Image: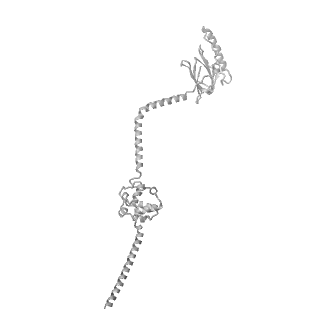
Amino acid sequence: MSEESTMPTEKEGAAAVTASEIASEQTTVDVADAAEISAAEPVALPLAQRLVQQRQKLGYSIEFVANHLKLSARKIQQMEEGDWSVFPAGPFLSGFVRNYARLLELDAEAMVALLPSDMSARPAAAGEIFQGSTFRSATRFMPQSTHRSWWRWLAIAGVALVLLLVLLPQDTGQRLREWSAELNRVEEAAQKPVLTPVQAPVQVPVPVAAPEPTPAPAQAAMPAKVEKVVEASTAPSAAPAPQLKAETGTVSAGQVTVHFNFGADSWVEVTQKDGRSVFSQLNASGTEKTVAGVAPLSLVIGNASQTRLEYKGKVVDLKPFSSRDDVARITLE
């Protein structure tokens, strides 16, 4: 009886050993599976941590990423810290994450899927905008700095306009009068020919009879002078018709004479020293005229290029005193 009772006891011990071994093997398998599962755990890392690890792996700085994505460095840090509340939810946030993932050579759609469901699905509020990004709502098209600059320049222009309106009327009238007077002086100077002194040979005294104590000798001298004028008129080619004679005037003491020979119709005006006009008329072509007056004589001669002027026995060149319209203005001393 003792041997039979001993046998079952040994069998039971063997069964217990076998069960213990099986349990030990199962425990080993569970530990190994847990280790494998633990090794694969990085796949389930939070999105922010995945972004940080991949950026550091590629050797990119936060400044580099911010410059590439057109975001501020602070926004990149907030993204890597998982602070999604500072970003506009919905398509905007998904677009930021997608661009960041592509820069880091990650699966963009897989990274977007790791976003919190309430952040990736909620649409952005009307008018919501992320400052500094490349996305803008329809209500804003220009950066805030541009708006500030535009308003600043508009204010400066307004102040300048007000000052101009206040200060301009005070001296505008005076300036306009000064400019008008200056313009008139310039026009008068342009119209009036510059009179140069008569050439030295012209200033040689003419043998005009000096005043005599009695009028009789003066009267005797006149025929000689008139005869000289007539002789000058007999020069060939002076007049086309021999029947035309030179008109002469009476020469008084202290007067000088000028002689004209007209090759074309010419208007002549002679003014003597006291400002009185002693001769003013239109002279026909082919005629001659001798005019006497008290020097200095001021002459205005039309058709100057076709008129011959003699003064004190010398021929006066009218070309330097003629204007573009062929009018000569000259003063004879």
Residue, x 39% and y 72% (percent of image)?
34
- Furthest toward the right, the residue is 236
Question: Residue 265 location, x and y as percent?
Answer: 60, 26
**Foreground residue, 13 or 24?**
13
Q: Is residue 56 left or right of residue 3?
A: right
Q: Quadrant of the N terminus?
A: bottom left
- Residue 260 vertical position relative to residue 33 in the rendered view, above or below: above
Question: Residue 59 location, x and y as percent?
Answer: 47, 60
Question: Residue 296 location, x and y as percent?
Answer: 58, 19
Residue 98 visible: no
Question: Hey, which quadrant is residue 256 in on the image?
Answer: top right
- Residue 127 vertical position relative to residue 217 in the rendered view, above or below: below
Q: Quadrant of the C terminus?
A: top right
Question: Residue 147 location, x and y as percent?
Answer: 40, 48
- Residue 85 vertical position relative to residue 211 in the rendered view, above or below: below
Looking at the image, what colour scheme do you see? one colour
